[in-house]
Amino acid sequence: MNHRIQEALKTLGISPPVSIKELKETYRRLAKEEPHRISELSQSYRFLINIMESYPFSFSQQELNKLFPEERIRSRFEHILWNKK
């Protein structure tokens, strides 16, 4: 998995699979609980949400295979990206 994605997930304390709704809820909860980390949390949240919302339009299957070479990780991350509700 891409190092930046791993770091963003770690910052928010979440692991795949996660939906956009779960990502938003986690971000909002952490922002209230840890206001001193708001900048770090916001950057991670925006990074992940942008990937999740733009994925179907931004990456071909070939590009996805390059980003996530391990099938197990790739299939788990695809679940995150496609489970938008």
Image (cartoon, rainbow, N blue to C red):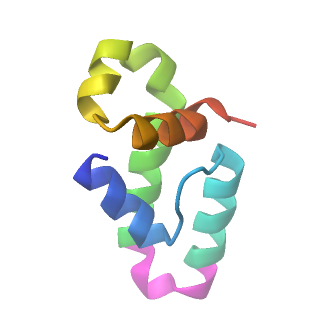
| Near-viewer residue (28 or 85) | 85
Image spot of residue 47 (x, y percent)? 38, 48
From this view, report whether residue 37 is shown above or below residue 12: below
Say which quarter of the image contains residue 22.
bottom right
Q: Residue at x 42, y 43 (%)?
A: 73
All told, the count of numbered labels is 0
Residues in magenta, as a range: 32-39
Q: What secondary structure is the magenta-colored segment mainly?
A: helix
Image spot of residue 23 (x, y percent)? 61, 55
Please check the rendered image and state whether residue 60 is part of the magenta-colored stretch, yes or no.
no
From this view, report whether residue 81 is shown above or below residue 62: below
Image spot of residue 62 (x, y percent)? 30, 14
Say which quarter of the image contains residue 51.
top left
Relative to 30, 2 lies left or right: left
Q: Residue at x 32, y 63 (%)?
A: 7
From this view, report whether residue 46 is shown above or below residue 26: above
| Near-viewer residue (85 or 70) | 70
